[in-house]
Image (cartoon, rainbow, N blue to C red):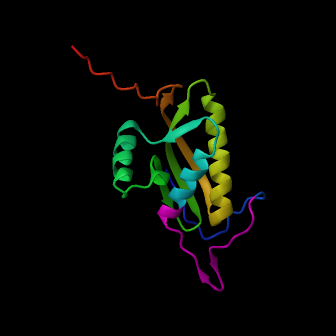
Amino acid sequence: MAAESTSTSMSRPDTPEAPLDSDGGRTDIADAVVTKIAGIATREVGGVHELGGGAARRIGSMTQAVGIGDERSQGVSVEVGEKQTAIDLTVVIEYGESIPRVADAIRESVTKRIEGITGLEVTEINISVNDLHFAGDDQVDPPLEPRVE
């Protein structure tokens, strides 16, 4: 993952110009901001069940239960430069969905949101499909009735 810092503006025709360094001062955007935007934008894509690897999801659910975790950053890693950012995502896809289609939709959604909200150019989005979610996986079996003898 590489987010280059360059002194020249690398605006794209479909991206509105949003200078982070202007006559009025400089705007720095924290990694946590880009991480949250990427997480939210990824979850908005149809076919994405959740973000994060198995261990990260278990730890995340425990930390969220005690109020210290933030699911919006789970499964997202970013590298933010002065004008560009690169993103790594770990996702769980719904079974039956086209992984290439979902991956393309994730890249489109994340790029649109990050470039629109922050003005940073997204240089790459690496997606790791960690698991598939099957309908019924989240259902918990009801507890067994105690046997009366």
Residue situated furthest left in the rendering = 149
Residue situated furthest bottom in the rendering = 24
Q: Which quadrant does the C terminus fall into?
A: top left
Question: Residue shown at 59%/66% (left/top)?
Answer: 83
Counting the numbered discs, the total is 0
**Magenta highlight on residue 107:** no
- Give whichever of 138, 75 is nearer the camera: 138
100 up-or-down from 35: above or below: above
Residue situated furthest front in the rendering = 149
Res 37 → quadrant: bottom right
Report the span colored magenta: 15-33
Residue situated furthest top in the rendering = 149
- Residue 137 x/y as whole percent: 47, 27
120 up-or-down from 46: above or below: below
- Give whichever of 71, 145 is nearer the camera: 145
Q: Looking at the magenta stretch, what is its main secondary structure?
A: loop
- Residue 92 x/y as whole percent: 50, 35
- Residue 64 x/y as whole percent: 39, 52
Is 139 on the left-hand or right-hand side of 112? left
Is 114 on the left-hand or right-hand side of 126? right
**Magenta highlight on residue 16:** yes
Question: Residue shown at 71%/63% (left/top)?
Answer: 11
- Give whichever of 147, 100 is nearer the camera: 147
Question: Residue shown at 47%/62% (left/top)?
Answer: 32
Res 66 → quadrant: bottom left
127 up-or-down from 39: above or below: above
Note whether residue 3 is visible: no
- Residue 93 x/y as whole percent: 55, 33
